[in-house]
Image: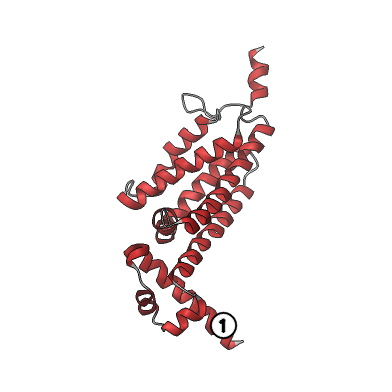
């Protein structure tokens, strides 16, 4: 039992060190020796857990996705209205990226353009995020909160907008606090699916609008 715990602790120490090293030096600039030194471990310990640098990098990519999904699921669970769920998902996504800046940089900046294997991994990760958005949009359509639209295309457009805001923050440091982008991004995205009127007020359901217009 103690040996298993020690192995798990070593693996986590290597991952924590790799997160810092990759964020500081980039994928190509980082080496196994850098990670070993930063983790106060040994090369033998590294290769026991990871066959190469690519493997530990992919493990880091895998670690951010469930963190974000769990945070978003908790936020959505506290809301009953589909539009409020979209609000909560967007807010928590930005908060999670901000809280895990190093991992976010690895996922959204460092992993881009590293080759076919990485591209496939990233596409699967992005597809999971887009699917989370798509489910909320489909529920909003089903309940009449927004008009019918192609929820899949809209979800990918939302993901693209969020991605660009986060990448800009990671590279330039603007805005100083990522969370401060939430109000403007929220208004833009909700308006794009007809959930917000031109003056920024939340729209009533399509059924209510139809009733009031008759």
In the rendered view, would you say 181 is above or below 107?
Answer: above
Task: Name the residue located 53 percent from the left edge and 82 percent from the top edge.
Answer: 7
Measured from the top left, where is residue 184 in percent x and y? 42, 36
Q: How is the image coloured?
A: secondary structure
Q: Quadrant of the C terminus?
A: top right
Instruction: Report if residue 23 is visible in the image.
Output: no
The residue pinned by badge 1 equals: 5
User: In the depicted view, which residue is nearer to us: 91 or 148?
Assistant: 148
Task: Name the residue located 59 percent from the left edge and 38 percent from the top edge.
Answer: 152
* Circle 1: element type: helix
Measured from the top left, where is residue 94 in percent x and y? 46, 49
The residue at the far bottom in this view is 2
Measured from the top left, where is residue 203 in percent x and y? 57, 27
Q: Quadrant of residue 114?
A: bottom left
Task: Name the residue located 47 percent from the left edge and 28 percent from the top edge.
Answer: 200
Q: Is residue 98 left or right of residue 214?
A: left
Q: Quadrant of residue 101?
A: bottom left
User: In the depicted view, which residue is nearer to us: 44 or 212?
Assistant: 44
Q: Quadrant of the N terminus?
A: bottom right
Q: Is residue 82 left or right of residue 116?
A: right
Measured from the top left, where is residue 140 in percent x and y? 64, 35
Q: Quadrant of residue 133?
A: top right
In the rendered view, would you say 172 is above or below 18?
Answer: above
The residue at the far left in this view is 172
């Amino acid at each position: 039992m103690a040996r298993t715990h020690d192995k798990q602790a070593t693996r986590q120490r290597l991952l924590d060190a790799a997160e810092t090293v990759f964020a500081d030096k980039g994928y190509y600039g980082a080496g196994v020796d850098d990670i070993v030194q930063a983790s106060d471990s040994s090369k033998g310990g590294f290769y026991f857990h990871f066959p190469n640098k690519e493997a530990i990098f992919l493990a880091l990519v895998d670690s951010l996705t469930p963190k974000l999904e769990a945070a978003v699921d908790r936020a959505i669970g506290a809301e009953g209205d589909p539009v409020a769920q979209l609000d909560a998902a967007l807010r928590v996504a930005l908060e999670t990226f901000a809280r895990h800046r190093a991992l976010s940089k690895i996922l959204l900046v460092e992993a881009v353009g590293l080759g076919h294997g990485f591209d496939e991994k990233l596409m699967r990760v992005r597809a999971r995020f887009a699917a989370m958005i798509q489910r909320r949009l489909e529920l909003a359509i089903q309940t009449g909160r927004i008009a019918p639209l192609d929820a899949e295309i809209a979800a990918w457009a939302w993901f693209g907008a969020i991605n660009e805001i986060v990448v800009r923050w990671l590279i330039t440091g603007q805005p100083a606090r990522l969370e401060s982008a939430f109000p403007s991004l929220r208004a833009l995205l909700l308006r794009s699916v007809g959930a917000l009127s031109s003056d920024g007020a939340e729209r009533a359901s399509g059924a209510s609008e139809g009733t009031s217009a008759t």
